[in-house]
Amino acid sequence: MLTSFTRADPDDRSAEQVRLTVMRAELANQLERHTGGADGVYPTAIPALTLVRASQSTHPSCGLFQPAFCMLARGSKRLMLCDEVYIYDPTRYLVVSQNLPLTGQVVNASSDMPYLGLKLEFDAREIASLVLELKQVEYGRGPKCPRGLYTGDVTTTLLDATLRLVNLLDTPEDIPTLAALITREILYRLLRSNDGWALAQMAMKDTHSNRITQAISWLQTHYREPLHVAELAREVHMSVSSLHSHFKAVTAMSPLQFQKLLRLQEARRIMLTEAVDAGLAGHRVGYESQSQFNREYSRLFGAPPARDIKRLREEQLA
């Protein structure tokens, strides 16, 4: 019995690349225009959409990354999750499916060719709604607990939807009606991609990924308190050993390490925005030992609290 198959036509692939190139150029022009040609992070009239421009490489910066889809029109960015490195550029998008403490750095930007990108945040309810409609069996397959972030190839259909969302900024009267529809289309395209199952598992009930989502949410609320892993395991209906193994599968760290990062990042934010000293900041995020706080802060950020905050303030003024 003969099985027929179709080879990808080289002309089709070439036409696809031409379309991608044209759309990327249009997206770059739109992002340059809507950022006013000035470096910075720009919220937009579409609440979940943020635009970013940078005319030079940046120092690594740490922060808690919310679930989001990220696409670049120009430049590239490096993200680190513990010791793992993820790089994305105009040919590859990024999806972060869990709240994760990440270190990010723009690595390819210049005044002539600035870094231009966007971030579209979403939540599990939006994903769950689409997953119920799609009813794709493969969403229950694959690793039981995939990493909470991944990269994928940009396609014309995904780039087209993203460009249409950005274009709505030129017709603000259309945003209340169309932004949610186009956002839903973008999430649909992501779910239908090769790695869509990794995004779907975040929102599917009774999966290990969904329970880890709940554990992360609990830690975000209770990070100042002493961590009792058995209590956390009960909260998310897992055994202690299962919680440890699946939490590390998703976040590349243990619950205790995750809590530590939350504490240190919040302490840094407090010192930078509220002008309090390290002693008070450490106490407010749950540290009882000042020396332990200073030691762990220096290990994470590469400098003692006072020196690190001074550098950050100088960079803000530059």
Image (cartoon, grey):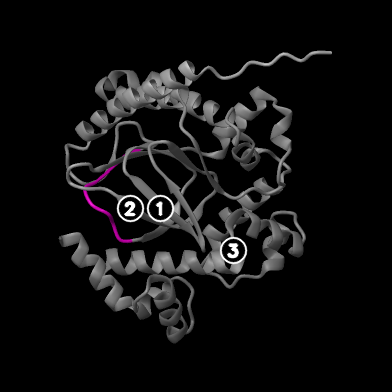
Q: Give the quadrant of the N terminus.
A: top right
Apparent side of residue 177 relative to residue 122 in the rendered image (left or right): left
Residue designated by label 1: 78
Going by the numbered disc 2, the residue's amino acid type is Val
Q: Position of residue 293 (x, y in %)?
A: 44, 79
Q: Residues within 10 Å of mark 1 (few under 14, many from 20)?
A: some
The dot on residue 317 is none
Residue designated by label 2: 107
Dot 3 or dot 2, earlier in sequence: 2
Going by the numbered disc 3, the residue's amino acid type is Met
Tag in front: 3 or 2: 2
Going by the numbered disc 1, the residue's amino acid type is Arg
Residue plotted at (43% across, 84% down): 290
Residue plotted at (20% across, 31% down): 33
Cα–Cα gap, marks 1 and 3:
19 Å
Cα–Cα gap, marks 3 and 2:
25 Å
Q: Nearer the viewer, residue 96 or 17?
A: 17
Q: Residues within 10 Å of mark 3 (few under 14, many from 20)?
A: some
The span shown in magenta is: 50-59
Q: Position of residue 87 (x, y in %)?
A: 44, 49
Is the residue under label 2 in contact with that under label 1 (CB below 8 Å)? yes
